[in-house]
């Protein structure tokens, strides 16, 4: 590694090596050979973290919307629940706001239909 002169290239190769090493070795072994900062600078590592954050946000918004709908209308039909679970985060956020104006489950059905879900 020390023969690779370009620091950015060296860091990227090191991060890729760590990812591959993770398929074979325990993390303690890998940490003995690599600095954690190098891995965190990897575009692959950052992409993984970003995806986890997005998934966590979607799960949080989904949970809130589901609780709000259940509180307002009681148990939601399984088919409707599945359609809601398929919504992207932005639409879940929109639904959370729109449901404040819903007076019945029919409003929810119409809202989902308008979005072709």
Image (cartoon, rainbow, N blue to C red):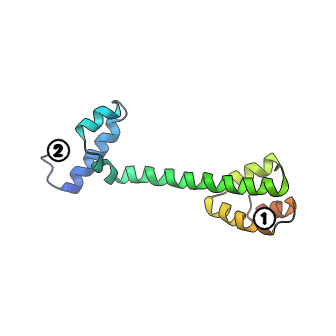
Q: Please identify the quadrant where the N terminus is shown.
A: top left
| Residue designated by label 1 | 111
Identify which residue, 117 or 53, lies in the foreground: 53
> Is the residue marked by circle 2 packed among few (<14), some (14-19), or many (20+) residues within 10 Å?
few
User: Which residue is located at x 37 percent, y 33 percent?
Assistant: 23
According to the picture, the residue beneath numbered tag 2 turns out to be 1
Residue 114 visible in rendering: no
Q: Earlier in the sequence, mark 1 or mark 2?
A: 2
Residue 58 at x, y percent in the picture:
60, 55
Q: Position of residue 12 (x, y in %)?
A: 27, 50
Q: Is 46 or 103 nearer to us in this picture? A: 103
- Compared across the picture, whether 89 is left or right of 46 comes to right
Residue at x 73%, y 64% (from the top left corner): 115
- Horizontal arrangement in the rendering, residue 24 relative to residue 79 (left or right): left
Mark 1 closeness class: few <14, some 14–19, many ≥20 residues within 10 Å: some
How many marks are shown on the rendered structure?
2
**Residue drawn at point x = 31 percent, y = 33 percent:** 28
Query: What residue sits 29% from the left and 41% below the top?
Result: 17
Q: Does residue 100 appear in this view? A: yes
Q: Quadrant of the C terminus?
A: bottom right
Extreme residue in the front direction: 71
Label 1: element kind = helix
Q: Position of residue 59 (x, y in %)?
A: 61, 51
């Amino acid at each position: 590694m020390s023969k690779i002169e370009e620091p950015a290239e060296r860091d990227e190769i090191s991060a890729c090596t760590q990812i591959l090493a993770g398929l074979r070795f325990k993390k303690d072994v890998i940490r003995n050979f690599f600095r954690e900062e190098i891995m965190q600078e990897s575009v692959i590592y950052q992409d993984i973290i970003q995806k986890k954050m997005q998934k966590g946000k979607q799960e949080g918004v989904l949970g809130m919307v589901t609780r709000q709908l259940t509180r307002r209308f009681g148990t939601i039909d399984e088919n409707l629940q599945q359609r809601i679970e398929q919504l992207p985060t932005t639409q879940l956020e929109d639904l959370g706001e729109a449901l404040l104006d819903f007076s019945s489950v029919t409003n929810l059905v119409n809202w989902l239909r308008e979005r072709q879900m």
